[in-house]
């Protein structure tokens, strides 16, 4: 994304990542041993609210990371053929990661 929209989305996904990490660490690491039992994790995974959270977190990570990588590629890759190759490879990688993540999150 170009211009102001890309800049705003990069900042918004950064805030979502911070919030997601706080929720993740609170639920999975700081709330006692019963929270990481097999039964608790299965019930959490099957909740539509947690699926929505996981998908929002997934897409935030993918957009934030690949948008940053896109900017680095634009700045450091000078040859037009290598730039196009890098961008296509990056888009395919982001798409594959997104499809794999959606499949895993919606599996149960």
Image: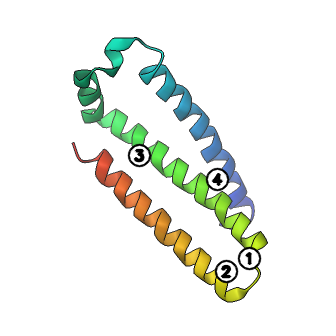
- Asked if disc 2 and disc 3 are in contact, CB closer than 8 Å, the reply is no
The residue shown at (30%, 54%) is 103
Alpha carbon separation for disc pair 3 and 1? 32 Å
Would residue 20 be found to the left or right of residue 31 on screen?
right
Mark 1 vs 4: CB contact within 8 A = no
Q: Quadrant of residue 51?
A: top left
Q: Are marks 1 and 2 in contact (CB under 8 Å)?
A: yes
Task: Using the numbered discs, state the Cα–Cα distance from disc 2 to disc 3 in whole angstroms.
Answer: 30 Å
Q: Position of residue 24 (x, y in %)?
A: 47, 29
Q: Could you tell which of marks 4 and 3 lies nearer the N-terminus? A: 4
- Report the front residue among 96 and 57: 96
- Residue underneath mark 4: 9
Q: Going 29% across and 34% down the picture, which residue do you hit?
A: 45
Location of mark 2 (residue)? 83
Residue 102 spot, x, y in % from top left:
34, 53
Classed neighbour count for the residue bearing mark 1: other residues with Cα under 10 Å, few (<14), some (14–19), many (≥20): few
N-term mark: 2 or 3: 3
Give the structural element (helix, strand or loop) at label 3. Answer: helix
Q: Position of residue 37 (x, y in %)?
A: 28, 20
- Residue 43 position in % (x across, y down): 24, 27
Q: Circle 3 sits on which residue?
A: 55
Question: Which of the two labelled residues, at mark 2 and mark 4, occupies the earlier sequence position?
Answer: 4
Q: Quadrant location of residue 47?
A: top left
The residue that label 1 is drawn on is: 77
Name the N-terminal-most of marks 1 and 2.
1
| Rendered-image quadrant of the C terminus | top left
Instruction: Check the image and report above or below for 72 versus 87.
Output: above
**Are discs 3 and 1 less than 8 Å apart at CB?**
no
């Amino acid at each position: 994304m170009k211009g102001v929209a890309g800049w705003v989305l990069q900042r918004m996904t950064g805030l979502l990542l911070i919030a997601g990490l706080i929720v993740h660490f609170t639920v999975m690491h700081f709330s006692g041993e019963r929270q990481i039992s097999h039964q608790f994790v299965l019930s959490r995974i099957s909740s539509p609210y947690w699926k929505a959270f996981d998908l929002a977190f997934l897409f935030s990570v993918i957009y934030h990371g690949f948008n940053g990588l896109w900017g680095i590629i634009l700045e450091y890759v000078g040859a037009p053929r290598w730039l196009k190759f890098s961008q296509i490879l990056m888009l395919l990688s982001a798409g594959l990661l997104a499809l794999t993540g959606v499949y895993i999150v919606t599996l149960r």
